[in-house]
Image (spheres, rainbow, N blue to C red):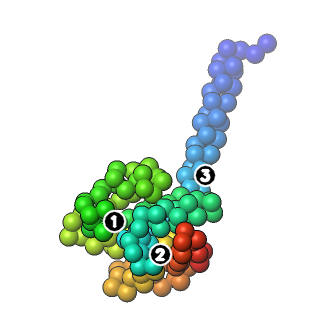
């Protein structure tokens, strides 16, 4: 017959193994999600369809990236709402037009360019950036831009999205 102490040790070891396994699964899921995150320079992308700022253009890019398995994080300059709607627009205002929750939309503070915020987010998430901007002014601070794979260029025409993934 097994002693109560032995049973307690067996239960303890099984629970410890379960906790370690669950932790490993959570860590694997998080790192996989981080690898598939992509940053969209919304203030650049909104001009891709004919040079007119349109939220629909950004939404089409978000949807295309979603079909490719990417989780989009979208950054805008503070004046994006004025260009799109004639008034200030924050994440809660923009998110419905983009088809994403507000937690995926960021707007740079007034007077702060979004470019370094876009690039810092990409650095933290180890993500690529969707933009036709070459970020020349920021290359010294973000040397990873020297890797051509970090920037995803693209175009849209009438809702048809072409990305160089």
Q: Position of residue 112 (x, y in %)?
A: 24, 70
- Residue of label 3: 28
Cα distance between the residues tagged 2 and 3: 38 Å
Q: Secondary structure beneath disc 2? A: loop
The residue lying toward the viewer, choosing from 68 and 151, is 68
Badge 3 density bin: few <14, some 14–19, many ≥20, Cα 10 Å: few
Is residue 12 depicted above or below 130 in this figure? above
The residue lying toward the viewer, choosing from 59 and 131, is 59
Badge 1 density bin: few <14, some 14–19, many ≥20, Cα 10 Å: some
- Residue of label 1: 84
Q: How many marks?
A: 3
The quarter of the rendered structure image containing the C terminus is bottom right
Q: Are marks 3 and 1 in contact (CB under 8 Å)?
A: no
Q: Secondary structure beneath disc 1? A: helix
N-terminal label among 2 and 3: 3
The quarter of the rendered structure image containing the N terminus is top right
Quadrant location of residue 162? bottom right
N-terminal label among 1 and 2: 2
Asked if one can make out residue 34 in the rendered structure from this viewpoint, the answer is no
- Residue of label 2: 49
Q: Position of residue 150 (x, y in %)?
A: 51, 77
Q: Is residue 110 left or right of residue 45?
A: left
Q: Position of residue 15 (x, y in %)?
A: 63, 30
Quadrant location of residue 107? bottom left
Cα distance between the residues tagged 3 and 1: 39 Å
Residue drawn at x 37%, y 87% as measured from the top left: 136
The residue lying toward the viewer, choosing from 105 and 27, is 105
Q: Secondary structure beneath disc 3? A: helix
């Amino acid at each position: 017959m097994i002693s109560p102490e032995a049973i307690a040790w067996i239960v303890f070891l099984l629970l410890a193994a379960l906790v370690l396994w669950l932790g490993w699964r959570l860590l694997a899921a998080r790192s996989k999600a981080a690898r598939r995150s992509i940053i969209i320079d919304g203030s650049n992308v909104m001009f891709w369809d004919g040079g007119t700022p349109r939220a629909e253009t950004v939404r089409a890019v978000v949807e295309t990236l979603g079909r490719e398995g990417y989780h989009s994080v979208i950054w805008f300059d503070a004046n994006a709402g004025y260009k799109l709607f004639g008034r200030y627009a924050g994440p809660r205002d923009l998110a419905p037009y983009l088809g994403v929750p507000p937690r995926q939309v960021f707007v740079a503070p007034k007077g702060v360019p979004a470019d370094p915020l876009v690039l810092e987010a990409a650095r933290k998430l180890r993500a690529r950036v969707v933009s036709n901007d070459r970020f020349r002014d920021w290359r010294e601070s973000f040397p990873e831009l020297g890797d051509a794979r970090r920037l995803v260029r693209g175009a849209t025409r009438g809702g048809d999205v072409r990305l160089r993934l």
